[in-house]
Amino acid sequence: MLSYNELTKGTLFILEGAPYEVLEMNFLRMQQRKATVNTKIRNLITGKILERNWQGSDSFEEAEIERKNSKFLYANRGEYWFCDEKNAADRFSLSGEVIGDSAKFLKPNTPVVATIFKDKVIKVAMPIKMDFKVVEAPPSIKGNTAQGGNKVITLEGGATINAPLFINEGDVVKINTETGEYVERVDKS
C-alpha cells in the first residue's frame, strides 16, 4: 500500500478499480491544518486527467502495469490488430476509441509498446515521430509564400496534415504522431 506522500510524479496506483498515473504532485500545508497533497492524475484506460487532494489517512494500492513490445498488423472494421514482437501467434485487438486520433498514423509493422493491466491490453504507445510518403499534394501557387504558407497534404494510409508549400507528391516527411504535425522533409522525390 502507498501512503499519500508516496504519490510522486510517475507513480502508478489504483483508484476506484482503474489504474492512474501521477502527473504532478504538490505538498500543501495550511496554517493549523494537516498537510495535504494536491495531485494531477491521468486514468491510463480513458486518458482523462483529474485533480485530486489527498490527506494523511488516504492509502492506495500500487498498480501492476506490464509493458511489452508489439507491432501493428492491420485494421479491419474499426478494430486494430497487433501481435507480440517475438511471437506473431500472440495477437490482440483494440477498438478505434481506445487508440484515439493516432490510429490514422498506424501502418503495417509499426512497432508499438502495449500497456497491460490485469492481463488486458489497455492502450498502445506509438513512436513519437514516424516517416510517411506523401501520396497527394496540391501544387503551390506562386505568390502565396510571403507568410510562409501551408497546404493540406495526404499521407500514405489516408491521414491529412498541414505542411509547407515546398512539399510535393512522392516526398517522404517526418510527422509527430502525438500532435499530428509536420516536422521535416526526410527525402525529396
Image (cartoon, rainbow, N blue to C red):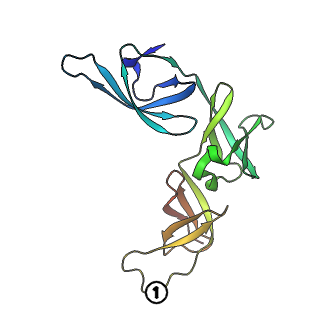
Please report the residue visible at 39 percent of the width from the left and 18 percent of the height from the top: 4
Q: Viewer-proximal residue, 171 or 178? A: 178
Relative height, residue 155 to residue 29 (above, below):
below
Left or right of 106 on screen, residue 75: right
- Give the amino acid at mark 1: Lys
Q: Can you give x and y, in whole percent of width and height, for residue 27 in the image?
A: 29, 24
Q: Determine the secondary structure under disc 1.
A: loop
57 horizontally vs 161: left or right: left
Residue in the image at 65% along x and 52% along y: 106
The x and y percentages for residue 172 are 59, 65
Q: Residue furthest bottom?
A: 142
Image quarter where the C terminus lies is: bottom right
Report the number of numbered marks. 1
149 to the left or right of 109: left
Q: Which residue is mark 1?
A: 142
Q: From the viewer's perspective, is residue 157 above or below residue 114?
A: below
Residue sticking out furthest to the right: 89
Mark 1 is surrounded, within 10 Å at the Cα level, by few (under 14), some (14 to 19) or many (20 or more) other residues, namely: few
Residue at 55% over, 63% down: 173
Judge left or right: residue 98 versus residue 76: left
Q: Nearer the viewer, residue 59 or 80?
A: 59
Measured from the top left, where is residue 112 in percent x and y?
A: 63, 42
Most distant residue in the left direction: 31
Give how far across and how far down residue 44 sits, in percent: 54, 34
Give whichever of 138, 117 is nearer the camera.
117
Question: For the point 75% across and 50% down, which residue is it?
Answer: 74
